Amino acid sequence: MLTQSQAEFDERTHCINCQSIRFSELSHGRFSDKPLTDFIAADPSGDDIRPYFETAEWSLVKCDDCSQVFHRRILTDAWNKKRFDEWMSADAIAEFESRLGPKHRRRFEAARSYVEHVLRIEQLTRSIRGDDVVRLLDFGCGWGKFLEVCALFGFDGVGVDRSNPRAQGASFRIYPSLEAMGEHPKFHVITLFEVLEHLDEPSETLSALAKVIVPGGLLILETPDCTGVTDIKAHYDYLKIHPLEHINAFTRITLKSIAERNGFTLLKKGSAHVTPDIVRVAKREIKHLIGRGDSSTQLYFRRT
């Protein structure tokens, strides 16, 4: 006998990338199966949420036409709202992040990466903005840390994030949705760092974002690289294809594909180094020269 109401799911009937209705199942299981249930117990959710998923099943599929991998069954809007508003509290997120290793090191590496993005953005937007300040939208901005770095360099940045605790704790104006922003000048650059893998309809989101970016503007996408991940057998797999959190599994090929379908062209992002270590610079430049520097799922695009 179930002691708690059970989470409800919607069934995806079309590919999230090319809209095909032809896809094949890669793997499936129950949320109550190990090791998945143990992984979920360690997530940032405050209380134990596993009783809500005693009867729930997951199914990972691959599109037969474009090779996009995604979870077929996703939480309904109402249950997703419950997840963000009730389970993923600010305290739960902070406690979870405290288990990820030394905070100072994570902050340092994140800041280094942010500054490298800022340097590239400033250079790559010169031709489309002239002397104007860089107008930037960080979609799925979290606590707004990237926006804080952008402000130090004089950018005019705003954020969108549906997680209320994050929006309340940020020092920047963060809207709950794109629609909530109202009228706003079009942006020179839009960033989505670790966002597309979470969205119910990523293609629709990119289509909407294409309408608020200037012609020739930059789109920066970054997702986990899910190349070769087809089942949840280990914690590494779970981090890539979490059935509640990472509901879309991108590779470099499918990330490029979904962006191009929505009016963006892949761009060489170029080099940017924030380090006093000349060896680090040399290694990264060598990777670029031999073609290994652009093999990730951190991609830059231009609005065509």
Image (cartoon, helix red, strand yellow):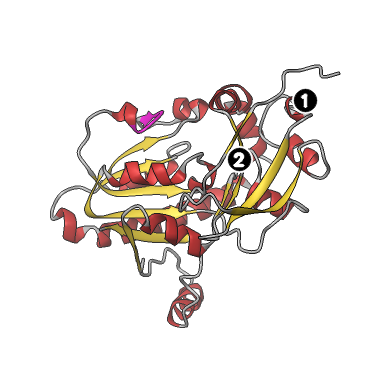
The foreground one among 193 and 71 is 71
Q: Which mark is residue 149?
A: none
Residue identified by numbered label 2:
245
Residue range corresponding to the magenta coloring: 174-178
Residue identified by numbered label 1:
51
Give the total of numbered labels.
2
Q: Is residue 220 left or right of residue 64?
A: left
C-beta proximity under 8 Å, tags 2 and 1: no
Q: Is residue 111 left or right of residue 233?
A: left
Residue 257 within the segment the image draws in magenta: no
- In x, y percent, where is residue 37? 79, 38
Amino acid marked by disc 1: Pro
Question: At x 77% / y 30%, what residue is drawn?
Answer: 55
Q: Is residue 285 visible?
A: yes
The foreground one among 15 and 296 is 15
Q: Is residue 101 visible?
A: no
Q: Is residue 279 left or right of residue 157?
A: right
Amino acid marked by disc 2: Glu
